[in-house]
Image (cartoon, rainbow, N blue to C red):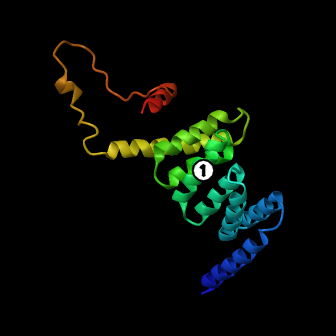
Amino acid sequence: MAGLLVNLVNRLRARLTLREDASGTLQERVQRADAALKDFRFLEAEQIYRSVLRDHPLHARAQTNLAISLSGSGRTAEAVALLEQALRLDPDDPKAIALMGAAQFQLGNLQEARGHLRRLLESMPPDQPQREALRDVLARIDSQIDAQIDATPGRRAATPDPVAAAPATGAAIITGRGELDPALDRKSTRLN
C-alpha cells in the first residue's frame, strides 16, 4: 500500500513539474531533471528530459540522462535506443559509452557490452582509479561468454584421449589450453 501511495505522489509531482517545465531556461530545466534523477524520481526526470528534448532534440546529455531514468524504471530497451542516438551525437562521451555497456549487459548482450566497456577502458587515462574495477567487470563478462560457449550444444567436439589417438612414433604429446592475445581478439571482433 505504501508503495502505491509513493507511486501516486511521484506521478502527481511529475505532472506538476511538467507544467512548470514549459518555462525556464534550458539550463534550469536540465538542472531540475538532474536533481530528480539524483533522487531516483525516474518518472519526473523522464518527463523533464523529454520536454528538453522536444525543444532541443540534439541535446546529448539530456538523451543520456533520459536513458538513465528509463533504465531505472526498468525500460532498458528504450534506454538503448536513446543511448544509440546520444552516441551518434557524441561518440566519445564516456558516460554514454559506460551506460550502453551496462544496458547491453542487462539485456544479456554480452559481446556488445564487452565491446563498449573495452572501448571505455581504452579511453581512460592510465592513472584513473576506475580502470581496475572495469578490468574486473570485463573479466567477469569474458567468463560468462566462455561459459555460454562451453554450454552451447555441438559447439565443441569431445576431446579424444591424446594417448590413445597418438601414433606409435614416440613423439611427445602436448595437451592444454591456449589463449589468444587480446589484440588478436579485438581484431576478430571487428571482423564479425
**10 Å neighbourhood of mark 1: few (<14), some, or many (≥20)?**
many
Q: In this view, does 180 lie to the left or right of 133?
A: left
The residue sitting at the bottom extreme is 1
| Residue 50 in sight from this viewpoint | yes
Report helix, strand or loop for mark 1: helix
**Residue 79, image x and y in percent?**
57, 56
Which amino acid does the dot numbered 1 rest on? Leu
Quarter where residue 128 is shown: top right
Where does the N terminus fall, quadrant-wise?
Answer: bottom right
Up-down relation of residue 159 to residue 143 (above or below): above
Q: In the rendered image, which residue does mark 1 sit on? A: 83
Q: Which of 17 and 162 is in front in this view?
A: 17
Q: At x 68% / y 53%, what residue is drawn?
A: 57
Q: In this view, does 102 lie to the left or right of 187?
A: right
Q: Is residue 90 left or right of residue 140?
A: right
Up-down relation of residue 30 to residue 140 (above or below): below
**Residue 75, image x and y in percent?**
54, 63
**Residue 25, image x and y in percent?**
83, 60
| Residue 133 in sight from this viewpoint | no
Up-down relation of residue 65 to residue 150 (above or below): below
Q: Which of 152 and 65 is in front in this view?
A: 65
Q: At x 32% / y 46%, what residue is drawn?
A: 151
**Residue 77, image x and y in percent?**
51, 57
